[in-house]
Image: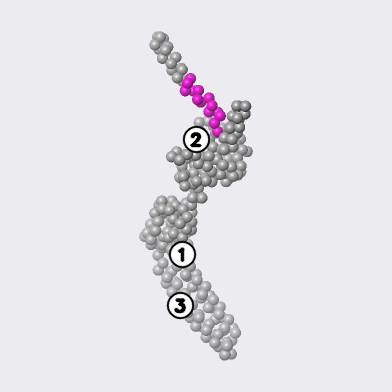
Amino acid sequence: MSRIARKRLRSLAVIIALLTLPLAGCDDKPVTYQGWIEANLIFVGPDEAGRVETLSVREGDKVEVGAPLFTLDSELHKADLNMTMATLANAKQTFERAQTLARSGSGTQKDYDAAQAALREAEARVNTSQTRLARRSIASPVAGTVQQVYFRPGEVVTASKPIVALLPPGNMKVRFFVPEAVLPRITYGETVTVRCDGCSGDLTAKVSFISKTAEFTPPVIYSLEERSKLVFLIEALPVAPANMRVGQPVDVRLDSDARSLNAKAMDAKR
């Protein structure tokens, strides 16, 4: 090997040594766990089948409680309401006549009771028809963002089939898995730090769910080193959900780990 080659090799070894010096303290950094952002969507659909007439929102729109979402055709329901109103008018006349006869002694108590029952039934049918008609115009039950629109004006939708999916900010959650050995260090309400690409600084969330059942490492979790085959699902509610996106991969760090490392560092300095 020539002298020039030996110098180059020596220089390369020095550079590698210098680059590896900062990594010596990596074991003192808190361990992070990979996870993702998930959400419990609110699916809004009609009680009965029908054709979509109007759609008042688009995907990405922010809506408040009571904001109009969509309407369905209501011709049959209007006709049903007209019919029940006519039946109610006849029932009122029959009841008034039976009431007059009962007061004068010409009618029987049985006829009066039957007329009164028919009137109450007719009133109930009118209330039902009015409710069915009112539910052809659907308003937002929650405040949030429109995530998905499944049907457009002119399309026929079946009963209970969602037309719009809404996402309230409070329905977002962070999901991640931890090895069995880490599980005893996690408690309900504990604060965790969340990092993600494009997020402004560190975000925080509070642990809201700890799985009681172990499972094998899911395929969506990738790690440079395999710590355990059995993992437990953890869910945490973000403090600022508006800064997160559904499906976004995140890195989660337990604050208890950070506190433990800080305590060890303080003891080492002493």
The mark found on residue 86 in the picture is 3
- Identify the image quadrant of the N terminus: top left
Single out the residue that lies furthest toward the left.
154
Give, as a three-letter code, the residue at label 1.
Arg
* Badge 3 density bin: few <14, some 14–19, many ≥20, Cα 10 Å: some
Q: Return the residue at label 1.
A: 135
Element class at badge 1: loop
Q: Return the residue at label 2.
A: 222
Element class at badge 2: loop
Q: Position of residue 69 (x, y in %)?
A: 42, 59
Q: CA distance from mark 1 to mark 3?
A: 21 Å
In the image shown, does 129 or 63 lie closer to the viewer?
63
Q: Position of residue 158 (x, y in %)?
A: 44, 60
Give, as a three-letter code, the residue at label 2.
Tyr
* Residue 236 drawn above or below residue 3: below
Seen in the image, is 151 located left or right of residue 98?
left
Q: Is residue 24 magenta?
A: yes
Label 3 vs 2, first from the N-terminus: 3
Give, as a three-letter code, the residue at label 3.
Ala
The residue located at (51%, 75%) in the rendering is: 123
Q: Main secondary structure of the magenta part?
A: helix
Q: CA distance from mark 1 to mark 2?
A: 47 Å
Residue 191 in sight: yes
Say whether marks 1 and 2 touch (CB < 8 Å).
Answer: no
* Residue 110 drawn above or below residue 208: below
Q: Which residues are magenta?
A: 17-30
